[in-house]
Structure formats: C-alpha cells, structure tokens
Image: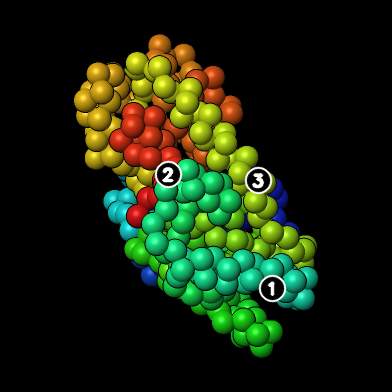
Amino acid sequence: MSDRVQGEPMDMDRHDFELDELIERIKSNDNRLVALQVPEGLKMQALDMMDAIEEETSAKIILAADPCYGACDLVHDKMQRMGVELVAHMGHSQMNIDSGMPTQFINVTYEGDPAIDPVLPILAQHHAIAEQRLADAQSEQSVGTEEAHERFLDAVGRVTPLTGTKLGLVGSIQHLHLIFEYKERLEEAGFEVEVPVGGARLTFPGQVLGCNYSGDQDDIGHYLFLGSGDFHPIGLVLHTGKPLAMLDPYSGDAEEMSFERIERILRQRFGLIMACDKAQSFGILIGEKPGQMRRTLALRMKKMLEKHGKKGYLLALEHIGPELIDFYPVDAFVNTACPRIAIDDSVRYAKPLITPFELEVALGEKQWETGYQFDEIP
Ligand code: SF4
C-alpha cells in the first residue's frame, strides 16, 4: 500500500489494524456518529471493521466510501454537516493540514520481514555508483550546457551536490516499524545507513510519500526502499536522481528502479513540455482536498501564463479525471493538485497534462538541461 496506489487487496492475516485506541476514544467521548475512511486496498474489509467498532461501542459508523489515496484527502466539513463527530482515518499518517474535523489516525502494520540477502548485490553496485559520482562531484569545476544535458540523462535526474555515499533507508508506512531493525542488519552487512527524517508532511523516520521526499540529504548516495510497487521508488528517483533498490516485504523479492524506466518517464515528460510549445490556453487544476490545495501556486501559474501572453483558467476539483476535464476548450492543463496525477496518469488525458515546473520549462522560465525538478508538496 502506498499513499496513492492501493488498489490491490491486502494479505489481511499478516496485517495489524490498531483499532483499540479508536474504540477507547469513541467510548470516552461517547461519540454517536463516526466516519471511517480507509485506503482503496482495504475497502473490501471495511464492513467487517464497521461491525467490529459498532459491536464494541454505541456509535454508528459511516464509511466514507469515496476513493482515498492519502492523508491529504481527509474527510472534512461535508461529513460534519451529516452530524459526524469523529473521523477514523486508516493506513496513513497525520500530515501538516487541518481538515477541521477531530481525526483519529489508525496505524496498519505488516509483519513480514524478508531477508536482505537478495538486495545486497544491488546495494553494492549502487554504492560503487555513488562513490564514482562523489569523486566526479569533488573533481569538477563548471559544466557546459551540452555536458550538463548529457550528464542529466546519464545521472537519472540532475547533477546532485553529493557529499557522501551513505545508504538511505526508507519505506512505505506499514513497514516503518521494522526500519531500525533493517538499519542494523544492513550495518552488519557493511553499509553506513541513514534513516532520513523529512519535513512536516511526514510523521515517521524513513517515511516517504508520493509527493514528499524531504528527508533526502546530500550525504546519502543511494537508497533502499522497503515496500512494494514502484510508486514511491519512481518519485524518489525523480526527486533525488540517486540509484534505488527495492525490497518487497510481501514477496521477499529485490530489484532496482532501472535507469531505462526513469529515462522513459523523463522522455515522456519532455515530450509533453514540447507539446505545450504552441499552447495558448491552459486549464490550471486546483485540488480541493485539504492536503492537495495549492492555491498560491495555481495563481502564480496564471500570472506567469499572462506574462507570456497566454490564458490560464483556474479549475477547482475534488477528484481529477479525464472525463472531468478533457472537454474544456483549452490546449493543455497544468496540475497543482496531487503531483502524481500529472506524472503517473498523463497518458489517460487527451491533452498534455504537465506539472508547474514543466510549465516553467515550456515558457522558458526554467532550464530542462540543468535537472528535472520533481513537483513536491512540502
Ligand atoms: S498528494 Fe501526496 S499524499 Fe496525497 S495522494 Fe498525492 S502523493 Fe499521496
């Protein structure tokens, strides 16, 4: 389960849902109406959870059944108008937003702890890459545009200001309770390991979100991601440009986020920027979800478009999908809601859908050659 890609049913026997605290809170508050919000991968089990809570308390539970991909998407005032007194939000951690509703976050942890042996050869290779890049960074003076362009593709991202070659250990939320145990195992295997601590949007050491990799440090030369799927790995490599290995606690498999994969994504992004070259009018998407709403950024994009003699129309939506925007008579869209909508889903849209950084490149305000800037929500 990631903060956004949670469509697959989960192996329920090995997951722990910490409902006790919620039940205690409902009892001590004497809450009568509680909204339960669960990630997509847990929706099949939601009715059992509702039964369990209703049996233990005198509250009635309403399932907030809209899609939910992260704590950015907390149930807010709509449920208040329904009389809901408390929101129980499962499987994501609290972030730096206020939904205006009392909210209890419910941890979900997975007990599987795969052996590190399969991932060690990949980590050794990546450590060697990091050492080479550090040596290059220390020896070089200034870089010409052409060379920067070459290196950009070569280094999967940008010329990062590396100061070390530590292994950064991160994971998705249901595996973070194991992170320091893994740190020890990896140190015993000879790696210098850092569990990065990010900014206010993140709660736990080693935590990453699809829109936030703020724990990255200059002395981290490569990464190990403890989790499944490529959602976080893609974002982390796009954000840092650093090699990344993955260890899947569900299958025990190890693999790396390949250079080819990232290069393909970057080429696709560049193609979309080029497709915006002649665009005169843009829809600027603003997310209405509490943790996705970037009004100031959207207004800045509109102003920038006007400066370049182009039109920007501000469009606010709770959910964003092709069927909701494709029909507007604009040439392209720039997305200020969940950053991953543009990165991961743009092929689903009939018109180019780009990030704010990509619009800046399209308008000549920023340079593609000096490095791709991942769209992060701080
Ligand atoms: S805004 Fe961030 S936390 Fe929310 S769904 Fe997108 S990637 Fe996940």
Residue 256 shows which numbered tag?
A: none
Q: Nearer the viewer, residue 61 or 4?
A: 4
Q: Is mark 1 within 8 Å of ligand 1?
A: no
Check disc 2: other Cα within 10 Å, few if <14, some if 14-19, many if 20+.
few
* Disc 2 to disc 1, C-alpha distance: 32 Å
Residue 358 percent coordinates (x, y): 41, 36
* Disc 2 to disc 3, C-alpha distance: 24 Å
Name the amino acid, label 3.
Answer: Arg
- Furthest residue toward bottom: 188
Where is mark 2, residue-wise?
145
Check disc 3: other Cα within 10 Å, few if <14, some if 14-19, many if 20+.
few
| Secondary structure found at label 1 | helix
Where is mark 1, residue-wise?
124
- The quarter of the image holding the C terminus is bottom left
Residue 261 shows which numbered tag?
A: 3
Residue 13 percent coordinates (x, y): 73, 65
- Residue in view at x 69 percent, y 84 percent: 189
Name the amino acid, label 2.
Answer: Thr
Q: Is residue 117 visible?
A: yes
Drawn side of residue 233 relative to residue 339, left or right: right
Q: Is residue 30 visible?
A: no
Looking at the rendered structure, the number of numbered marks drawn on it comes to: 3
Are dots 2 and 1 in contact, CB under 8 Å? no
**Of the residues under marks 2 and 3, which one precedes in the sequence?**
2
| Secondary structure found at label 3 | helix
**Of the residues under marks 2 and 1, which one precedes in the sequence?**
1
**Of the residues under marks 1 and 3, which one precedes in the sequence?**
1
Q: Nearer the viewer, mark 2 or mark 1?
A: 2
Residue 310 percent coordinates (x, y): 28, 19
Drawn side of residue 110 relative to residue 210, left or right: right
Q: Where is residue 297, by image quadrant?
A: top left
Q: Nearer the viewer, residue 3 or 336?
A: 336
